[in-house]
Image: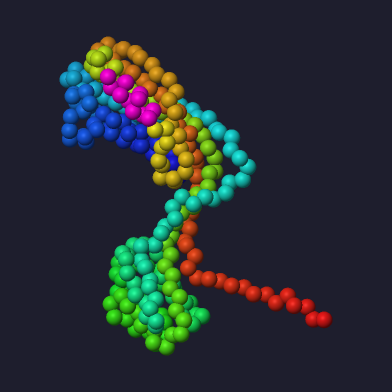
Amino acid sequence: MADPSEILNVIAAQVAAIVYPNGTSSASISGTALNVYAGWPVHSVLNTDILAGTSHISVFPLDGEQKIPTALGRPYREVESGDPTIVATVSDSSVTLSGTVSTPQNVYLLVDGTGYHYAVQSDDTLTTIATAMSTLIPAASNVDAVISIPQAIEIIARVGGVGSQARELRRQTKEFMVTVWAPTTALRDSLGSALDSGLSINSNLQLSDNLPAFMIYSRSMFSRDTQIYRRDIVFSVNYATSQTLSAPQVVAPVISINDYTQPH
């Protein structure tokens, strides 16, 4: 679920990418030292750095928020499909496992109408998965990742991953302020201009719940306090408070047949 602390960190990361386009170990776009962080500056540290020629760029949430009306109903939507990384290939009376092992995943074999399921463990290999399946299936054996079922007439193999679904519980907008604290007007103006345009290029924010989130420019202010030149750039973020659950892919078919034939 996305929250203001996550949004703070996402915006701070975007700010750092703008002012340090080649990485924080390389020179900044201003050619001077910069401190970028989520939160409000410590005044004693800020004053010391400003006197030394180091600018600060802070990201801070403003008080209050506004609830956004949403449509009735709160359906779940898929945010991650959870595609499997293991492949099970049937050839005559054998099954070969290939691909890479990751969790969570489920391996399922339907042998002559009887299903056998194994949940992949974090320390598994393709061979240990094949061994586990061979243990479950009567008369089956395996060599490495190849499972042999000599008496089988029909084999169906399926592998399913585990994705995630989420639904919006509510949606709101909250303002976040990006502030440039600089020792000169030239630095304030150059950094502020770069951040204003850079943060406005893409209004979409990618948050952990994968639900839509948008950041839109709101307003900008200039001020000066003693030897500190400051510019505030305020953005409004529209984001969701959500509920997320796991969504395993279906691997085992379930069929229910009811006979509704009425006697004559």
Image quarter hosting the N terminus: top left
| Res 60 → quadrant | top left
Label count reads: 0
Q: Position of residue 227 (x, y in %)?
A: 25, 12
Q: Main secondary structure of the magenta part?
A: helix
**Left or right for 95, reference 236:** left
Task: Residue at 42%, 57% (x, y): give it.
Answer: 82
Whether residue 248 appears in this view of the structure is yes
Magenta stretch in the rendered image? 190-201
Q: Position of residue 17 (x, y in %)?
A: 28, 34
Q: Residue furthest toward the front? A: 92
- Of residues 262 and 163, which is closer to you in this image? 262
Task: Residue at 38%, 78% (x, y): give it.
Answer: 91
Q: Position of residue 28 (x, y in %)?
A: 21, 28
- Of residues 141 and 153, which is closer to you in this image? 153
| Res 99 → quadrant | bottom left
